[in-house]
Amino acid sequence: MSRRLLEFIDIEKSFFGVKVLKGVSLTVPAGGMVGLVGENGAGKSTLMNILGGNLRAEAGAMQFEGEDYAPANPQDAARRGIAFIHQELNLFPNLSIAENLFLTKFPRPRARPWIARGEMHRRAAELLREVGLDVSPSRLVERLSSGERQLVEVAKALSIDARLMIFDEPTTSLSVREKERLFALIARLRARGIAMIYISHTLEDVFRLCDDLVVLRDGEVVKAGATATFTNEKLVSLMVGRTMRQLFPERRLPARRDGDEPQAGLEAGAPMMEVRGVSQPGVVENISFALHRGEVLGLSGLMGAGRSELARILFGLGPRAAGEVRLDGELLPRLTPREMIERGVAFLTENRRTEGLCMDAAVADNLTLATLPEHARTPWRWLSRESLHAAVTRIRDVVKLDAKARDAQPVRTLSGGNQQKVVLGKWLLHKPRVLILDEPTRGIDVGAKFEIYRLIHELADGGAGVLVISSEMEELIGLCDRILVMRGGRLVDEMPRAEFDRERILRAALGAESQGGQGI
Amino acid sequence: MNRFTRRALDFAPLLLFVAVLAFFGAQSGKFLEPRNLVNIVVQASSTGIVAVGMTFVLLTAGVDLSVGAIMFVAAAVAGKIALGGLPLPFALLAMLAVGLVFGAVNALFITRVRVAAFIVTLAMLFIGRGLGLRITETRAMNLPDSFLELGAARLLGVPLPAWLFAATLVVAHLVLTRTPFGRQVFAVGHDVEMAKKAGVRTGTILAVVYLISGLGAAVAAMVTLGQLGAVSPKFGEGKEFAALAAAVLGGTSLFGGRGSVLPGTLLGVLLIQTIENGLVIVNANPYLYPMITGAVIFVAVLLESLRNRTPGGRA
């Protein structure tokens, strides 16, 4: 067996009391290339953040080149020769390539105060030659394409003499040619003995590039071994596996409007929101679906598949190049958040803290924010305190907000679960007919999750249409009547509750399938 | 937007400057005489030096509203010292010290206590003006002739203030473009957190830009003293906004990370000064000056924001 370069030993880490890494051990051999795969939230990013010094493990240890390794910050990692090539690149667009490469270690002529520009450009040009980027080192980074910027990132890694490079989804924003160029570069770097960890959802690339594969699921390594011992099929089923059953409220069949036809429940509900051919270049492409009265519709897909972007377009927060949206059969000429709210559409963004709540304002103020005009009384349109108070009391009860949370308490001081209930309560006061929920249970505890699931069902039973975006497949399967799967900005699969199948969903989301990808 | 318009917008301040020169040149023969052009530079030098310091601060996405007040305190202290009979160099050194102390206090509250630069320097503006009034006992102070002599001194036929301005510009330009510190100022201005992650000592960088700004204000106060020979209670008042306007007019972004001293801030200062000078020469109504200057600043900044609105595509 070859020498070990990096070793993770029983790494543990939790967030908000939830264990996201449950004793992860894995090894990167010297000069080897390890592919790290797993679903969203399997713990890949957390593990890499620990390696890079952005997070600290609660238990376990790391060894790098045979020595203990415990980085306190990203600079520690860089000093040891560990370099990250991130999805969102960490380059300064307002500086030149050379300046980005040498930002904290500018060459200077014998301790003079100024930069030795000649030497800097010569060394930068050398690094650029190594990564095969044929542009002047004095060019500003903002004038480079995303593929070229990635090569600059690799050059940066070379400049610190990296012995281990971590590629995190490096190909998502690259063209086919740029991707081939990157892979050729990876091959050259490997020939020089640089070890790599490659994280990607594009299984085809992982198979092509890596010697070893490690499958992470729910914070545990479920299988590690030579790439040759895996097949595409096997990899997908390992990624999905059997997860712990979470508690979901029992879903009664969608309310039947006509009293008969117990099984054809969904179609019995009239379409509330119809989306036809919605496109926005580079974001989503030709999206068509209908959301029915009383339906809970799930939207699955990997990060970057365009789910949140689609939600934002439907609510009028993002531009739309083509396509139409109908509410109750009526074509909407333009989409603006104001118009959508007036028509009874509510949208919970995935960023509760920054977009959903005024964190320093009181619970009561947050709850009534969207419906203030309803509480204004003539003749002077002053707000009626009684009316506001009544609304707050009523909705607190509906969302089962923690009794300890006072009306006047700042939202910031509440737990994540209670914060989310406040956001939901705000929109419920508006009596929405269509609810779009983006990651409604992210970062909240199990008990609060259950409450939120129950609320979603009650809303649907009351005749609302609910669109739920979630990265937790388990959640969609437990919660929804129907699931749509997105990949690369398109809808690639659709299945009713009776056909829910984890592997099929994941396969469609990954695009690693043979049968799953019938277009809709 | 096509390429030509983009290029034109790139040079908006320069084109505006040429247009203003041409306009006033056509109005009056005196305007383009070398004597008047030198005069414009000399008149611009005090605001210009403040604006150079301000440019450093703006590049980090900060702002320094206290520069006018620093000028006042520095001048008042210098006046006291000079009137007390100490020789000129002592007064000048004391001015520099005042600038550095104020800059250091700004830096301390901004980097250590983490109060917004706008608030810290606004407070320092009021504290400084109050302190200056206390020192001068709200009376105008006439200084010894040595100050005026210094202000009128010439080297190779060019007045000393213009030399000082030129030297400030060249040194600042070299620091910003050729030293690690200068390049890190741009990095911090683009994104502090990212710069910190990249290993840049962001606290030091931020502290130093406020020291530079304070020092710039002190040097500008020297130039103004050399030109006026007196400290009035209004000394330096409104300089912070004149400097801000000049820097922004020269293409420096209020959001940090973009801008230059040469040609940027120089052009901005000269443009404002040239308009005022031209209006005097064509005998315009003095009440119009601020309005016309304001309109030109507005147009230049509008053009700048148009340029930034277009996606930063590849050339």
Image (cartoon, coloured by chain):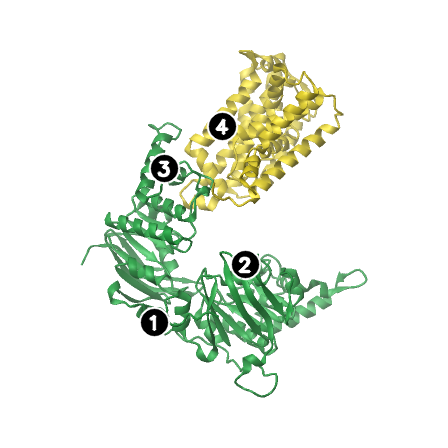
Chain colours: A green, B yellow
Secondary element under disc 1, as helix, strand or loop, is helix
Label 3 to label 2, Cα distance in Å?
Answer: 37 Å
Q: Nearer the viewer, mark 4 or mark 1?
A: 1
Mark 3 chain: A
Q: CA distance from mark 4 to mark 1?
A: 62 Å
Quick one: label 4, few (<14), some, or many (20+) residues within 10 Å?
A: many
Residue furthest to the right: A379
Q: Is residue B26 left or right of residue A250?
A: right
Dot 2: element: helix
In the image, are marks 1 and 2 on the same chain? yes
Q: Amino acid at mark 1?
A: Ser
* Mark pair 2, 4: CA separation: 42 Å
Relative depth, front residue between A224 and A449: A224
Same subunit, tags 4 and 1: no
Count of numbered tags: 4
Q: Would you call the spot at circle 3 few (<14 residues within 10 Å), some (14-19), or many (20 or more)?
A: some
| Front of the two marks 1 and 3 | 1
Identify which amino acid the numbered label 3 is placed on.
Answer: Lys
Quarter location, residue B295: top right
> Residue A353's mark?
2
Tell me whether circle 1 and circle 2 mark residues in contact (CB < 8 Å): no
Q: Which comes sooner in the sequence, label 3 or label 2?
A: 3
Label 1 and label 3: CA atoms lie apart by 47 Å
Residue A41 location in percent, x, y?
41, 64
- Give the secondary structure at mark 4: helix
| Residue placed furthest toward the left | A1
Which residue is the site of mark 4? B172
Residue matched to label 1: A237
Which numbered disc, 1 or 3, marks the residue that appears first in the sequence?
3
- Amino acid found under the numbered disc labelled 4: Ala
Residue labelled with disc 3: A105
